[in-house]
Amino acid sequence: MNMNTVLIIVLMVVIGAIIGGFTNSIAIKMLFRPYKPIYIGSWRVPFTPGLIPKRRDELATQLGVMVVEHLLTPESIQKKFMNESFQQEMTKLAQKELEQLLSREENLDELFSKLGYENGQEWIEENFERFLENKYDQLMEKYREVPIKSILSEELLEKMNSKIPQISHYILQKGVEYFSSVEGELRIERMVDDFVKGRGGMLGNMMQMFLGNVSLTGIIQKELLKFLNNEGTEELVTTLLRKEWDKVLEWQAETIEEQFGREQLLNTIKRTVKKVIRVDRILATPIAVLAEPYRDKIIDNIAPQAVLMLGNWLSNKMEEMMERLHLADVVREQVESFSVERLEEMVLLITRRELKMITYLGALLGGAIGLLQGIIVLVIG
């Protein structure tokens, strides 16, 4: 083998490598370039634009389908939500956020203002009144023809029944205090005068003759106080109150509504609730102060349970949510909105090394083919 033969073989190897590498490099670039079709007159130059620009819409559609059917599937997301380590991370995050929220010095009124409710108290009271009205209507509809004693608990009935003697004692005590006072004495005196005048002057003169200098008002006041302080009187009042209370317990709910009227009952309930629940004071109290008695329970117990419940709910609703989100369309629209330059940059960023290896492989194969051709020429020659 002389020097010329070796030179020819080497030259064929080099040329083959150059052609192979250059051809692969051109083929790779033709995936993206040219970005737009090239025309000579009305004739479009073949292979323009590049493969990916030409079929970008189809690529976007297929990417959307691939993401939904193989990557972000409801099953994979459900599995992630139910993963123990993920739930622990979410619980820690929720506890951290809750701790910050419950430690804030601003009050609820300021928080409502940030949320867009300038008059938080009015908004809460309106909604609470609406809630009370709805609850009243629901309960009235349910218990309209039911006696009151069937609605109240046994414990409450016993407690209320035990209060009747105290009420009797209180009524009689107030009666004693009133009729022992100057105002009560004047009241008795006016009643006596009205009684006497209503029956003519003769009755008054006769009573005055029998009583002498003793005041009729004083006698009646003394006897009245004696009657009010008598134990039998208290038993009598207690018995009467029990009988009336038993009658009230037999009332149906609709009877109470007929007696007092729906609006009056509702207004009474609303006023009572407003006295018990002072919305203005609650709104003016800092969040940290309101939450202090319940802080540890909320963070340690309620937060983990809430995260677990939310995770279960999202898992059960994931398929429906993904259908409503139309993720395939979202991916397709995003890909379609990318410029070809951006698509090329993304693909090259991921596959740059592999594409270079393809170029080098083309050069290697070209060189090997050149060597083979050289050997064949040498053998034939």
Image (cartoon, grey):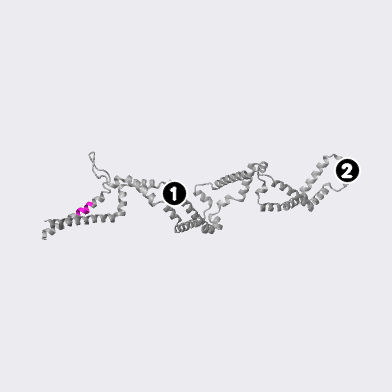
Q: Which residue is at a point 62% across and 51% down the rendered structure image?
A: 276
Q: Which residue is under mark 2? A: 206
From the top left corner, tell me how far across and down residue 172 is, in percent. 75, 51
Quadrant the C terminus occupies: bottom left
How many numbered marks appear? 2
Answer few, some or many: residues within 10 Å of disc 1's Cα (few below 14, many 20 plus, some between 14 and 19). some
State the SS at label 2. Answer: helix
Work out whether residue 199 or residue 50 is closer to the camera in this orientation and state it.
50
x and y percent of residue 78 in the render?
Answer: 44, 53
Is residue 133 rendered to the left or right of residue 340? Answer: right
Q: Residue furthest right?
A: 209
Residue 96 % position (x, y): 48, 58
Q: Which residue is mark 1?
A: 319
Amino acid tagged 1: Glu
Tell me the element at label 1. Answer: helix
**Magenta highlight on residue 95:** no
Q: Position of residue 350 (x, y in %)?
A: 31, 54
Residue type of the residue flagged with mark 2: Met
- C-alpha distance separating marks 1 and 2: 101 Å
Within 10 Å of the Cα at label 2, are there few (<14), some (14-19), or many (20+) other Cα atoms?
few
Segment colored magenta: 18-23
